Image: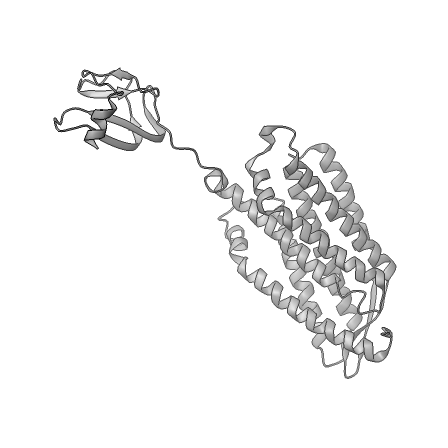
Amino acid sequence: MVNWSSPGELAKDGEAFSRLMHALLGLYVWEFATSLDFDWEYISGKKKFRWPMIFYFANRYFLLFALIGIAVALNVDSVVNCQALYTYDQVFGNAAVGLASINLSLRTMAVWSQAWYIVVPLVLVILGHWSLLLHGILLKAEYVTGTGCVITKTNNTLLAATFIYSMAFDFTVMILTAWKLAFPTSRKDQSRIVQLIFGDGLIFFIIAFLANLLATIFMLLDLNAVMSIIGNVPAAIASTIVACRVVRRLSNYTSQGAQTFGSTLASTLAFSHGGRTRGGPSVSMQDKEPKGVHVQMETFAAVPDSTPSDHSFVQYDVTGKIVGSGVAFDLEAGDELKREF
């Protein structure tokens, strides 16, 4: 049986923790770099900045600052204040976890059309979440010659309570979102935003919940000081990535509109009483050429209110009846039409 408290096991766990953190840093930097064009659209003013984007930007950059701090702590080769360094990492890391939950809950509020009976309870839950996240210093670290910064003690009780709360919070917003998507109160509630989240956004809520569940399991097992927190950073990164992707997806929806995400209209014949109309193709037939019937397809038609002065022009309504013509033409003469085409 493994002795998780032995010095040899702690050394192996510390090495595994270091390698995992470097891999996760690379993953997050890749995700961060590939989405910088979205950030630049707001920084350069191409898109209008709105207050919910504060949580988006804070979430992304706070986690980046925390991961840089962790990388520094794992690679120091001279005496430094390890406690201050890990306190910095904890503050920004916990803030990233809280901001990710806020970003997901804001999407849930949007799905429920900002109904007060959804917004008020979620705001109260958010405040309770942050009271745990900013409760205090939950780990101790010190510099060990030849090794670097080493975590020596963790407050597992409060850490477990924090991640259980985060897991329950993410589960709640996931259920609320799934309920609204699956059982809309009316047909009109099935807006394009609802369809969009149902199509590819609900999985983001599930990933955030599972990431916090994994961190909670390691916390409750309490194997040693390193293994107790080894799931914290993966949970923070997973929650941040999926929350920010939800924000970017819905922001692109609102800026591009229904032309991109809405369903296309079926092709139909467009008719109007006058003016320039937009719709499906209109059909007009003329009998000026004796050899056959000329069919002209146009995506935009300008039809005057009055009957055209050219009496050889044949105009039809939606049922196929002639509404204006100087020439008699029988639509039911199918044999003649077949010979012409």
Identify the colour scheme used: one colour
Residue at 62% across / 63% down in the picture?
Answer: 28
Location of residue 36 (image quadrant): bottom right
Q: Kindly tell me whether residue 323 is visible in this rendering.
A: yes
337 or 115, nearer to the observer: 337
Residue 231 is drawn in which quadrant? bottom right
Depth check: give the residue in front, 306 or 286. Answer: 286
- Residue 134 appears in the rendering: no
Number of labelled discs?
0
Q: Is residue 152 above or below residue 245?
A: below
- Which corner quadrant holds the N terminus? bottom right
Q: Position of residue 144 (x, y in %)?
A: 80, 80
Give above or below for 15 relative to 295. below
The residue positioned 77% from the left and 84% from the top of the image is 146
Image side of residue 223 versus residue 41, left or right: right
Residue 125 in the image: x percent, y percent? 78, 44
Residue 173 percent location from the top left of the image: 71, 44
Q: Position of residue 84 (x, y in %)?
A: 78, 68
In the rendered view, tell whether residue 12 sits above or below residue 216: below
Q: Quadrant of the C terminus?
A: top left
Q: Residue furthest bottom?
A: 146
108 horizontally vs 199: left or right: right
Residue furthest toward the front? Answer: 335
Q: Is residue 5 above or below residue 208?
A: below
> Residue at image x 75%, y 69%?
85
In this picture, residue 271 sits left or right of residue 253: left
Q: What residue is shown at x 25% (from left), y 24% (from top)?
A: 334
